[in-house]
Image: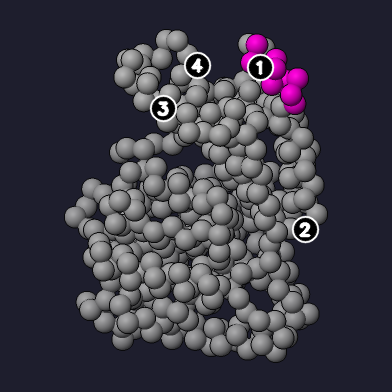
């Protein structure tokens, strides 16, 4: 793709690259990978992560890399709002000023929430006095496009139908993320045959013939791509940006930059019953539940703090760390007396009867399907009789894979 460098003077501004894309496309996985690779260079990198949920799961995952943190002055998390909303952009401005003033990075990376529309962000950065937008990278889930949108064909059809009716839907968001992108990263491409990936790329090029489409897996891209990105070509998309704003004004819909997905939070101290949780996920997950994520524990693995990571009909469990309460329960934990006392002191301030163990999950999707899935998940918590059984050393049937990936915290 030939994208000419605009008149923006990159030498006088801090370059910023945006990782955009729909829920579950792999933005956080890519960001983690980039951070590890950029850490090996001389670049000073600062990160802003936006999570529409109050749980701020993505922020916790990125901070867990230990490469960025609030203490190091190179990390800001913007949660419980959409980065493209009026409130989100106001908080984004504060975050940028903070990072530029305290850390003075060579490069800024911004991960957006999955429901954010690119247009307000592009308008905001177009004439920013201190930051120059370079890459606007859109991550697109290859598996989702193949299974839910016939390799992208019905995505385009749905987008056109919304245009004709003057409405906005998920197809509108997905299509316009592609149309405003400078590069598209087709994630999870390793799960499909090469000809299927090529078919998806062909459909996406109908939405934006100018873009490079890069197939990737597990967030792996050539790290040299990021620092070498040219200035974003605002001139190329100016007409489209104007049309988006005019379209929404014409149909009397205030353009907040966020699509009205429903979000519900589950917060409970009790463990999940592993078999009921498995059965519920097999039964209820459908196209309307786009994303759910958070941290949880199960009665069968009561020492493990697990990351819940669901996209459409797929769920991954990742080991985050050990619960302090779980460590103390084991007599062979290898702790010296001082370490045990320190953990006991930390847990003494916990109001939960299970110490630091708890389940906090956010569910994002459309309408009744989110409500049904959330209600079903709540029925998966152990009952009082099951908790009594667990306390007495009872065993629970656990159909979940026994081996789970561990989130790495060091390189």
Disc on res. 367: 2
Q: Is residue 388 magenta?
A: yes
Please tell me whether mark 4 or mark 3 is closer to you in this view.
3
- Element at badge 2? helix
Direction from residue 99 to residue 300 in the image, left or right: right
Q: Judge by depth and name the residue closer to the eye, 221 or 2.
A: 221
- Tell me the CA gap for discs 1 and 3: 24 Å
138 versus 131 height, above or below:
above
- The residue lying at 65 percent from left, 68 percent from top is 259
Name which of mark 2 and mark 1 comes first in the sequence: 2
In x, y percent, where is residue 85? 56, 73
Q: Which residue is mark 3?
A: 345
Evaluate if marks 4 and 2 touch, with contact meaning CB atoms under 8 Å apart.
no
Q: Which residue is mark 1?
A: 390
Name which of mark 1 and mark 3 comes first in the sequence: 3
- Element at badge 3? helix
């Amino acid at each position: 793709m030939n994208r000419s460098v605009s008149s923006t003077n990159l030498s006088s501004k801090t370059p910023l690259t945006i990782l955009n894309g729909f829920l579950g496309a792999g933005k956080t996985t890519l960001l983690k990978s980039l951070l590890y690779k950029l850490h090996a260079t001389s670049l000073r990198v600062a990160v802003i992560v936006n999570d529409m949920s109050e749980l701020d799961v993505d922020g916790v995952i990125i901070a867990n890399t230990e490469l960025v943190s609030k203490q190091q002055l190179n990390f800001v998390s913007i949660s419980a709002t959409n980065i493209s909303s009026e409130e989100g952009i106001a908080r984004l401005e504060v975050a940028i000023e903070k990072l530029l003033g305290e850390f003075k990075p060579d490069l800024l990376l911004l991960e957006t929430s999955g429901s954010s529309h690119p247009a307000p962000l592009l308008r905001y950065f177009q004439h920013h006095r201190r930051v120059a937008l370079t890459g606007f990278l859109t991550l697109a889930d290859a598996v989702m496009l193949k299974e839910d949108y016939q390799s992208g064909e019905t995505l385009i059809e749905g987008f056109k139908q919304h245009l004709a009716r003057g409405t906005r839907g998920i197809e509108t968001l997905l299509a316009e993320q592609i149309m405003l992108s400078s590069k598209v990263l087709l994630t999870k491409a390793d799960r499909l045959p090469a000809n299927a990936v090529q078919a998806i790329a062909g459909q996406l090029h109908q939405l934006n013939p100018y873009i490079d489409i890069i197939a990737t897996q597990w967030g792996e891209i050539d790290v040299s791509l990021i620092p070498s990105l040219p200035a974003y070509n605002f001139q190329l998309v100016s007409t489209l940006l104007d049309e988006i704003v005019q379209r929404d004004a014409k149909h009397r819909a205030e353009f907040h930059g966020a699509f009205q997905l429903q979000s519900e939070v589950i917060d409970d101290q009790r463990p999940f019953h592993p078999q009921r949780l498995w059965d519920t996920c097999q039964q209820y997950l459908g196209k309307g539940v786009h994303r759910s994520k958070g941290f949880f524990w199960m009665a069968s693995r009561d020492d493990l703090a697990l990351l819940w990571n669901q996209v459409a009909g797929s769920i991954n469990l990742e080991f985050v760390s050990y619960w302090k309460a779980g460590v103390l329960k084991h007599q062979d934990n290898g702790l010296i007396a001082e370490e045990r006392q320190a953990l006991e002191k930390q847990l003494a301030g916990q109001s939960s009867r299970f110490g630091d163990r708890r389940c906090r999950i956010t569910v994002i999707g459309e309408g009744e399907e989110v409500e049904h899935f959330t209600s079903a998940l709540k029925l998966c918590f152990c009952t009082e009789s099951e908790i009594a059984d667990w306390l007495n050393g009872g065993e629970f049937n656990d159909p979940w894979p026994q081996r789970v990936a561990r989130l790495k915290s060091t390189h």
